[in-house]
Each structure stands twice: as C-alpha cells, then as structure tokens.
Image (cartoon, coloured by chain):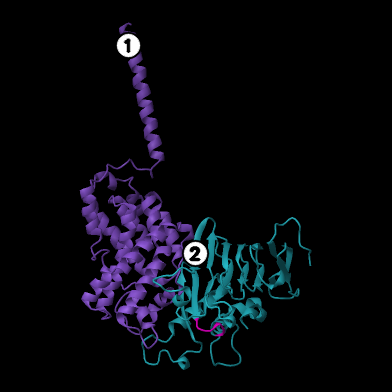
Amino acid sequence: MAAPTPLLAAGDGLIHARLLPPSRLVLPHLEFAYPLKLISTSPPTARCLTVFMLSYGGGLVSADQISLTVVCEPRAKLTKLFKRRTPLHITSQRLTATLHPFSALLLLPDPLQPFADSHYTQHQTIHIPTDNSASFVLLDWLSEGRSARNEHWALHRLESRNDVYAGSRLLLRDALVLDEELVGGETLQSRMDGFACVATVIARGPLFAGLVRYVLERYQREPRVGAKGFGGVRERRWDVLWTAASVRGFLVVKVSGRELQEVRGFLKEMLEEEKGGEGEGEVEGDVVREFGEDALRCLR
Amino acid sequence: MSDTDTDAVSTSLHAEIADLEARLALARARLPTIPAPAPPIPPASTSHLLLLLSDSALPLGSFAFSSGLESYIAHQRTPRPSGLDSVSRFLQLSLHALSTSTLPFVIASHTHPSTSHHLDDLFDASTTCPVARRTSISQGRALSTVFSKSLSPALPTTTTTTTSPFTTYRAAQPHGHFSVAWGLVCAACGVDLQSTCYLFLLGHVKAVVSAAVRMGLVGPYQAQALLAAEETREAVGRGVERGMGVPVEEAAGGVPVLDVYLGRHEVLYSRVFNS
C-alpha cells in the first residue's frame, strides 16, 4: 500500500482503475492524504476492483474536507465502498468520477448518519462518455441520525447533490437540502413524516440494462394504494414506500422507510434482482454477475 | 471648394456610411439573442395582463392537476387528520419544496430571458420525478401557446419579433417546463420579478385548494378562508424570499417525502387528477 502522498492536499484522494488485457484489473494510482484513507482489498482474480474509503478515527470530524477523484479507464470495473460514520460539524465531501468508454462504477456507501447539529455537504459528479457505453450504479442514502441517542433528523443542514454530465451537458441532477428551519411551525423531524431513512439509486449503462428492466417491472407490480389490503405489511415484503422511473436514459429509484433495516433489505433485494420464491437456479442479477457478491456488502 | 471636390467628399462619405451600415448590420446579425430594447409596456397594460395571468383558468388545464395533493392524502396513515389540517399542512410543505426547487428557475428565466432554453434543459435534468415532469411540461406548453396565440398580439410588436427571447426560446424546441415559461411570459408582459414570483406560488396555492374542494376535503367557504388566511399569505411571502436566495445551480428539493408521495401518484388505485 502506498504511503499517503505529500503532494496531495489534506483530504484529497485519487483512484485510477485500469484493465490490463485480457482480464486483469489494476490500480496504477491509489493516492490519498490525511484524513482520508483508501484501501483496496481485491485479489487479482476479482471481477472488479474494490476500494474502501476510510477516515482516521472512524468518522469525519469538524471542518474535514474530502475531495476524491476517480478515473475508470476503458473497460475497467470499480466498486467504491465508503466505510463512513458520521459528520460532526461542518464537513464536506466531493467526489468526481470520470468514466471512460465501456468502464463501470459501483458507488455503494454506507448510509450517511447525520449527528445532531451537523452541517454536511456532499457533491458527487460523474462524467460519462458521450457514446453511452459506460455503466454505473450510484446509491445515496441517509438515516435520521443516532436514533439510539434519540437523535431523529436533528441535523443543522445537509446538502447532497449528484450530477451526471456527458461532455458539458448536465444529463441528470438529483439534489436534496435538509435544514432545521421551521416550515409552517413544523420541525425537520416532523416533516419527515416518520421516515427514518431515505435513499436514491441512480443507474445507467449497458451492463445494467437487466437491472433497469427488473426494477421498472417490479414497480409496475407494486400494490395499488387505496386498493383493498394496502398498508398491510404482509402484502409487501418490505415496509418501504418507493418509486422507480426512467428519466432521460437513467433509472431513478427513491426509497423511504420507517426502519433503516427495511430500506437496506429492500435495496439488497433490488440490486440482486431477487425474483422472489423461485429458489435455486436463479439467474444472477447484473450487479452480482459483473461485480461479485461482495460488492453488495454495505447492504448486509 | 470646387464642385468636383464636393462631389468627391460626398461620394467618399456615402461610401463610408454604406460601409458603416453594412458593418452595423453584420454586428447586429452576430448578436441575435440581444433584442432591441422593448418600449416600456404602459403600467395600466401590465396590471391588466397581471390580472389575466392570475386567472385560475391559467395555465390551461390546471383543473386536471392536484399538484401532489391527491397522492399525499391517499398515503396518509389512519387515523387521518381532518381535511382542512391535511390541506394546510400540504400547502406549507409543498410551498417550501417549490420555493427551493422550482422558483429559482422562474427567477432566472425572468431575469435572463435569453437563456430560457438552457434553463429549460437544466430544469428537465433536475426534475427526476416523472409525475412532476409531466405536469410541468403540460402546463408550460399550454402557457406558451396561450402567450403566443392570445397575449402577445396585445403587446408592443418588438416583444414578439424574431429576436425576442420568447421566439428564441420557442425556436430552440424546449421541453417546455412551466417554471421557465412562466418567468419568460411574465417578463414579456412587463410584470416585475416580485409579482412574477408571488403569482407563481399563489397559482400553486390556488390549484391545490381548488383540488381540495373537488376532493371534498374542504368546503368552498373554508377554501376561501384558507386562501385569505394570514398564514397562507406569509408562507407565500416567505417562499418568494427563500427562492430569491437560491441560484439555479443550487436548487434542490427540501421535503423528500413529498417527492415519494408525488411519484407514487402512478400507483394509486383510483385517480381523479393527472398529478
């Protein structure tokens, strides 16, 4: 493992993924500077490269700023998993990923868990090639905070923005700002209507065509609201409210649930393309086939 | 000075004038998006247009939309709060969401009308909920049509020439989102920015309250009381103020549960409205 490179500014990191023909994936660059730490654990035979992102002491602390650049060279496959705990005060995290033709990226972090009074900004930007040959799945999710300490959406401000560009054109922007301001006399916690977790999944590209089809079909089969039996948990495998849509060539999924575990279970099942009850001999979903079971470890 | 000298001078002056005029025409042609300054629309005419734009029949077809209220009510857990409580809460939350996600585009389009087609694509990229997209495009296109067919003939001709922002916008074949079209149309009618924003949010309030009456959540007198209420007026005012502080690049939703409810309008068992 390379030692932290002094040339980088504090909190900066660089990940460069490359495919050496015929099938060996390597990281010609993996650089980082305190308080950011990157670890790659992939054996040379793995279906994809996996990089963990850690920060010293297990969480981002006041005024830490993380800025990470990711490059996936042609045909390279990279999974990036964040082991992150929580922002305490003002922290920001920026990630810029450039995908070259036929490369693929999975961004599957643990859920963000904003502490009381935290101020957090996250900007993630993905540049895809204009030939539409690159593929990615991005998960962005957050929980209400440390509920064991009775923190429920007690944050000061949280901003999360996911942008996808092809060339200079913005193809998709998913942006959320939560702040503690009262609205019509209601606190942020009250406006969240009892939901403890909200998640967004964005997917695109030829490698995930099967996943997109699966999710859209599954949404079509969603029990109708107001029909007899809606609201009974027995009717639905997971206690979540979700939507799925095809927007400007992307799959956009929004999930919210009253329990983090319900959202986690739902997301895992969705990304595994679980068909439900058919038992052995099921066809592997796109994510598992391309990246292996371990890629979904943050959802266990 | 002899006659021939005078002739020579006047010939060269004519040539110079012709040259300058040609260069002026060329320079004008290179700047197609900068319109000649429109003559000010008389204030009486503007307030007349303002009252027309605030008609609840506009945008055309707005009676078909509940702006998310129908799905919100369908997702309420039992015991459900009273109809009036539900509608007032929905108004507060949806005004908040609208002021940070959509109003910035109204403001930008009103302030920089020549960039409207670009703003339209930016708004399209930022609106990931298909139900919201459908509503916005349907109302925006209706408004554009009303403007070009019905309102623009009443305006000074320069606002409708080939170099006007509206013509440039239409020529770029935009998706046609309502927020951008609203800013553009209000600017063309001479409506000031503050009124444009206030009317945009008030239009939302009127559409929601009108849907609530048709859904039987509130009676017609309760609906008028809700429209007139101080808290509604304050919420609209605060929304305008909040939206003014958000540049389009920072526009974002602030009430994620509303997006989920609105998106799930598609899986309602029975539907009265298109959104």
Amino acid type, callout 2: Leu
The label shown at residue A172 is: 2
Q: Is the N terminus of chain A in the top left, top right, bottom left or bottom right quadrant?
A: bottom right
Quickly name the residue at label 1.
B6
Q: Quadrant of residue B259?
A: bottom left
- Residue range of the region highlighted in magenta in the rendering: A257-261
Residue at x 38% of width, y 51% of height: B111
Residue under mark 2: which chain is it in?
Answer: A
Chain containing the residue with disc 1: B
- Chain drawn purple in the picture: B
Q: Look at the image and say whether residue B50 sits in the magenta stretch.
A: no
Q: Is residue A6 left or right of residue A91?
A: right
Q: Do residues under tags 2 and 1 come within 8 Å of each other at their CB atoms? A: no
Q: Residue at x 38, y 55 (%)?
A: B107
User: Looking at the image, how many numbered discs can be counted on the residues?
Assistant: 2
Residue type at numbered disc 1: Thr
Relative height, residue B101 to residue B6 (above, below):
below
Q: Position of residue B256 (x, y in %)?
A: 46, 73
- SS state under label 1: helix
